[in-house]
Amino acid sequence: MAMTLDLIEAQIAAWSGITAPNDAAKRMALELAGTIAAFEALRGTLEFEDEPASFTAALQAAKA
């Protein structure tokens, strides 16, 4: 789904009740759309084994 600035601003207004204060904020909102699309592209590609099953397992993996 291609996110447009209008859609992003409408979602922000609906969830937070605010509007973008300036052009820099609008550019950052559009960059966020790219980040969301990148995460959506990963959907279905990760399996349970790709992530530690618990916080303790994550700590152990970080030590290695």
Image (spheres, grey):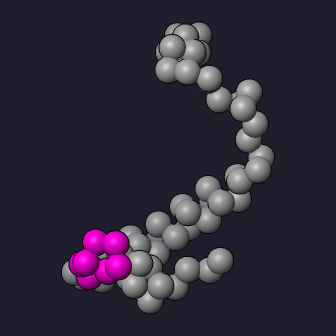
Q: Return the residue nearer the eye: 2 or 64.
A: 2
Q: Position of residue 2 (x, y in %)?
A: 62, 80
Residue 21 image position (x, y, % from top left)? 22, 81
* Furthest residue toward bottom: 6
Stretch in magenta: 13-20
Task: Give coordinates of residue 22: x percent, y percent.
Answer: 24, 82
In the picture, which quadrant includes the N terminus?
A: bottom right
Q: Residue at x 38, y 70 (%)?
A: 28
Specify the quadrant of the image occupied by residue 26. Answer: bottom left
Whether residue 26 is situated above or below residue 45 in the rendered picture: below
Residue located 26% across and 82% down the image: 19
Q: Which residue: 62% across, 23% down?
A: 53
| 5 w.r.t. 63: above or below | below
The quadrant of the rendering that contains the C terminus is top right
Q: Can residue 27 be seen in the rendering of this structure? A: no
Vertical relation: 3 (above or below) 35:
below
User: In which quarter of the view is residue 37 placed?
Assistant: bottom right
Q: Image check: 40 left or right of 19?
A: right
**Which sits in the foreground, 9 or 17?**
17
Residue located at (41% from left, 78% from top): 11
The question of residue 56 being in magenta is answered with no
